[in-house]
Image: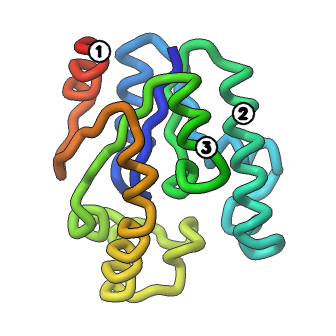
Amino acid sequence: MLIFLLGMMGSGKSTLGKQLAQQLGYTFVDLDDYIEQREQRTIAAIFEEQGETHFRELERAALQAVVQEYRQAVIATGGGTPCFFDNINYMNQHGETIFLAVPTREIARRLISTNLKIRPLLASKSSEEINLFLAKTLAHRIQFYEQAKYKMESSAISVDQLAQLLNHK
């Protein structure tokens, strides 16, 4: 089984994804890391050198490659992955999708305490601008996130909650 974790940057997709994969005995794949390894450069460099449109094309190709490569994996998608092309439908067809619905205030708190240089969409923003960006971005993306098969709504989602959700399907 493939399990795709969806949600805004900072919602815990990578952190929870690693824990869930370990608990299930699955491989963990961070889609952004996968792209960086394939491209031999950072996401920030791809954005800077070739723009978001090119990155989204690479992201789509990486998503398809991961689906072909793995049979049992927890995949932490990029925050925008479900929102481009038909990626959300593709993920729903090839596995279980879980939207990690974390309040934007909590996401902002988490992100502000990290190295924002690795997040090209936030790198030059102030705390106030980050809050506004997250609210605006979520307003656009929610229509895609809501198409996930499952939704976990909390500011403190645990790996046990995710495992329990999957066991009840």
Residue identifier under label 3: 87
Using the image, determine if residue 38 lies above or below residue 53.
above
- Residue 117 in percent (x, y) is at 56, 73
Residue identifier under label 1: 169
Q: Residue at x 55, y 55 (%)?
A: 83
The earlier-in-sequence mark between 3 and 2 is: 2
Q: Nearer the viewer, residue 131 or 82?
A: 82
- Residue 19 in percent (x, y) is at 36, 28
Q: For residue 142, which quarter of the picture?
A: bottom left
Q: Residue at x 18, y 52 (%)?
A: 155
Q: Quadrant of the C terminus?
A: top left
- Residue 98 in percent (x, y) is at 37, 35
Crowding around mark 2 (Cα neighbors within 10 Å: few <14, some 14 to 19, many 20+) is some
Q: Residue at x 73, y 40 (%)?
A: 62
Crowding around mark 3 (Cα neighbors within 10 Å: few <14, some 14 to 19, many 20+) is some
The earlier-in-sequence mark between 2 and 1 is: 2
Q: Is residue 50 left or right of residue 105?
A: right
Name the kind of residue labelled 3 in the image.
Answer: Asn
Q: Secondary structure at mark 3?
A: helix
- Residue 54 in percent (x, y) is at 79, 63
- Between disc 3 and disc 2, the foreground one is 3
Q: Secondary structure at mark 1?
A: loop
Q: Secondary structure at mark 2?
A: helix
Q: CA distance from mark 1 to mark 3?
A: 22 Å
Q: Is residue 51 left or right of residue 147?
A: right
Q: For residue 161, which quarter of the picture?
A: top left
Residue identifier under label 2: 64
Q: Residue at x 49, y 55 (%)?
A: 79
